[in-house]
Image (cartoon, rainbow, N blue to C red):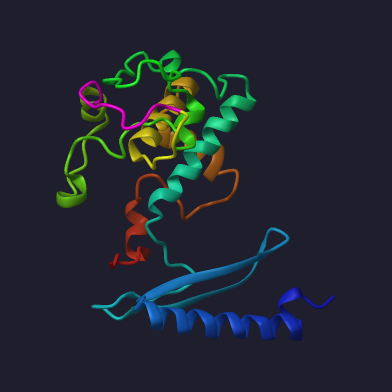
């Protein structure tokens, strides 16, 4: 049987996708990207476009890896749902049931308690970040500093009333994953998400062996 990628119709569409990607990269001044197409759980097409490192003129390839930033929030929420399915927590559990240290200056004491559901849906009312200038100096706080500083922070909105993107809330959700599973966050993510999905090029911490494949970040 002819593979799906050998179909004339599919080949025409892939050429259109390639032209669209190249046009988009030119319009957005994007140095490079890697794209893959899966069909029935199989990678049937992959290609690198442009450069993974402009200064060194290293081309992007299907093997190039990229910083995935807030896609890690998807992993954290998936882990919470897995633990829910195992009966180890409920989405409407108050956060403090699993993290006794979870305390902040609550401007809206009449609002519902902050729950796990609030954390992973950005409806906790918590501020976007911990109170450190890490997006300016890239000196990110340790988890201990994040926990310690939380008591001095206050919520922006009452929980369950407005959507507000919060890196802080998802960091706390990651702490719930570790506390409930009894595993460090990175170990849980590897064992229960990355390894079962054969995501061999994805990691919480960058292994030294992957460093040469990592695209340079541009912005």
The C terminus sits in image quarter: bottom left
Q: What residue lies at 57% left-to-right and 68% top-to-bottom?
A: 36
Judge from the rendering whether residue 145 lies leftward or rightward of residue 121; answer left or right.
left
Q: Is residue 175 above or below residue 7?
A: above
What range of the chain is rendered magenta? 150-159
Tag count in the figure?
0
Judge from the rendering whether residue 137 lies leftward or rightward of residue 151; answer left or right.
left
Q: What residue lies at 39% left-to-right and 42% top-to-bottom?
A: 165
x, y percentage for residue 101?
32, 16
Task: Tell me if residue 153 is in the magenta stretch.
Answer: yes
Q: Is residue 214 above or below residue 17?
A: above
Q: Residue furthest right?
A: 1
x, y percentage for residue 39?
70, 64
Q: What residue lies at 42% left-to-right and 27% top-to-bottom?
A: 159
Q: Nearer the viewer, residue 182 or 174?
A: 174
The N terminus sits in image quarter: bottom right
Task: Tell me if residue 121 is in the magenta stretch.
Answer: no
x, y percentage for residue 125?
38, 31
Q: Nearer the viewer, residue 23 or 206?
A: 23
Judge from the rendering whether residue 113 lies leftward or rightward of residue 140; answer left or right.
right
x, y percentage for residue 95?
43, 20
Q: Main secondary structure of the magenta part?
A: loop
Q: What residue lies at 26% left-to-right and 20% top-to-bottom?
A: 105
């Amino acid at each position: 049987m002819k593979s799906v990628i050998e179909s004339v119709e599919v080949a025409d569409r892939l050429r259109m996708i390639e032209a669209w990607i190249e046009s988009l990269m030119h319009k957005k001044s994007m140095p490079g990207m890697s794209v893959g197409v899966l069909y029935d759980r199989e990678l049937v097409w992959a290609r690198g476009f442009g450069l993974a490192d402009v200064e060194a003129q290293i081309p992007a390839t299907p093997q190039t890896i990229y910083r995935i930033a807030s896609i890690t929030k998807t992993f954290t929420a998936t882990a919470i749902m897995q633990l829910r399915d195992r009966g180890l927590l409920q989405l409407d559990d108050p956060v403090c049931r699993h993290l006794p240290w979870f305390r902040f200056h609550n401007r809206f004491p009449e609002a519902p308690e902050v729950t796990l559901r609030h954390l992973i849906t950005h409806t906790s009312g918590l501020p976007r970040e911990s109170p450190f200038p890490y997006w300016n100096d890239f000196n990110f706080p340790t988890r201990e500093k994040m926990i310690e500083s939380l008591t001095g922070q206050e919520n922006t909105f009452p929980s369950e009333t407005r959507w507000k993107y919060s890196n802080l809330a998802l960091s706390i959700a990651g702490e719930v994953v570790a506390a409930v599973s009894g595993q460090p966050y990175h170990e849980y993510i590897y064992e229960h998400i990355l390894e079962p999905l054969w995501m061999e090029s994805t990691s919480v911490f960058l292994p030294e062996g992957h460093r040469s494949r990592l695209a340079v970040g541009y912005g």
